[in-house]
């Protein structure tokens, strides 16, 4: 599907991505259903609550549903994120989350873009920078260090999470140039770094998740060191990941974009379909 009508894209996003569990499920992660909710336990940076729709749950029943998620993670001593979208109902859901002790973080914009058009653009990083697919723990640690610098907060958990995802990924055989006439592609996740050729310093990084059974691949990361911004590195990471998604037959890319990333992505052809705000409860 490549129709860029906002309502069509939003409907596809809701139907195909909103209540998806990780596939494959990393070691140590548990996925549970609680009415309309999918609850994910055992992630490296706290738990997660998502849903396609609350199915008309309102009032006291909704308060009980929210409180139950809070209490489950409080008993574990873990924080949990309830991902609220701008078009979610009921209208007072944000007030009820706050009343239960959930705190809103920065709003992001959900953007969807066509894979084919983006994949047709060559991912050309600036001179002296190369893009490289990585799986080794040392590279994942370098990504976590980069993210910690960019966001001014410890992100060591990120390397742990990516490593567990990669370990759970069985890959898929694809006809190619391998020794036996084929090569193994990641089935669920590809992690990329942009690094300075001369020093090997990681200056930006991003990853793409291929969502099985849908038309979507989703983009994550994309953080760039301040001194390297404005040179087209972020754009080259996006187009490279679009080419990976295109080769695997996906037709749409989705990303939760920060205010800094949104204009770049819209210039590349992404369309804003809604907003999302993490509501976080910390015991």
Image (spheres, rainbow, N blue to C red):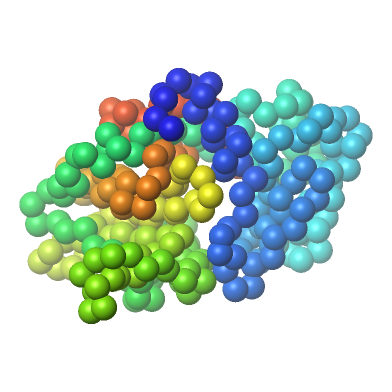
> Can you say whether 101 is above or below 177 in the image?
above
Compared with 238, 145 (above or below) is: below
Locate residue 28 relative to residue 24 in the image: left or right: right
Q: Residue at x 51, y 71 (%)?
A: 168
- 106 left or right of 229 in image: right
Q: Residue at x 69, y 42 (%)?
A: 51
Give residue 194's quadrant in the image: bottom left
| Residue 282 image point, x, y percent | 70, 54
Instruction: Name the foreground residue: 112 vs 163.
Output: 112
Q: Extreme bottom residue here?
A: 179
Left or right: where 177 falls relative to 154:
left
Nearer the observer, 179 or 46 = 179
Q: Position of residue 160 (x, y in %)?
A: 49, 71
* 164 with respect to 131 (left or right): right
Residue 4 in sight from this viewpoint: yes
Q: Residue at x 82, y 46 (%)?
A: 35
Residue 143 in view in this figure: no
Q: Residue at x 71, y 35 (%)?
A: 53
Q: Residue 21, image x and y in percent?
A: 62, 54
Total of numbered circles in the picture?
0
**Residue 70 versus residue 236: which sits nearer the camera?**
236
Q: Quadrant of the C terminus?
A: bottom right
Q: Quadrant of the N terminus?
A: top left
Residue 246 percent coordinates (x, y):
32, 46
Q: Which of the pair 211/191 is nearer the observer?
A: 211
User: Looking at the image, which residue sits at the far right?
Assistant: 60
């Amino acid at each position: 599907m490549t129709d860029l009508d906002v309502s069509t894209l939003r409907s596809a996003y809701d139907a195909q991505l909103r209540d998806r569990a990780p596939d494959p499920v990393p070691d140590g992660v548990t996925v549970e259903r609680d009415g309309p909710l999918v609850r994910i336990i055992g992630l490296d940076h706290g738990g997660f609550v998502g849903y396609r729709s609350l199915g008309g749950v309102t009032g006291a029943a909704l308060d009980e549903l929210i409180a139950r998620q809070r209490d489950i993670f409080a008993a574990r001593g873990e924080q949990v994120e309830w991902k609220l979208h701008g078009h979610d109902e009921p209208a007072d859901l944000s007030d009820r989350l706050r009343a239960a002790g959930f705190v809103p973080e920065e709003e992001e914009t959900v953007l969807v873009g066509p894979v084919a058009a983006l994949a047709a653009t060559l991912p050309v990083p600036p001179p002296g920078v190369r893009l490289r697919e990585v799986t080794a723990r040392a590279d994942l640690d370098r990504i976590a260090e980069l993210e910690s610098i960019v966001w001014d907060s410890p992100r060591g958990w990120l390397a742990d999470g990516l490593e567990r995802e990669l370990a759970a990924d069985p890959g898929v055989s694809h006809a190619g140039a391998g020794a036996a006439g084929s090569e193994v592609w990641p089935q669920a996740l590809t992690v990329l770094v942009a690094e300075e050729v001369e020093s090997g310093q990681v200056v930006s990084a991003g990853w793409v998740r291929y969502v099985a059974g849908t038309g979507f691949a989703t983009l994550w990361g994309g953080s760039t060191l301040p001194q390297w911004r404005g040179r087209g590195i972020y754009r080259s990471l996006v187009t490279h990941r679009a080419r990976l998604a295109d080769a695997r037959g996906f037709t749409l890319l989705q990303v939760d974009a920060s205010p800094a990333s949104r204009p770049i992505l819209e210039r590349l052809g992404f369309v804003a379909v809604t907003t999302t705000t993490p509501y976080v409860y910390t015991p």
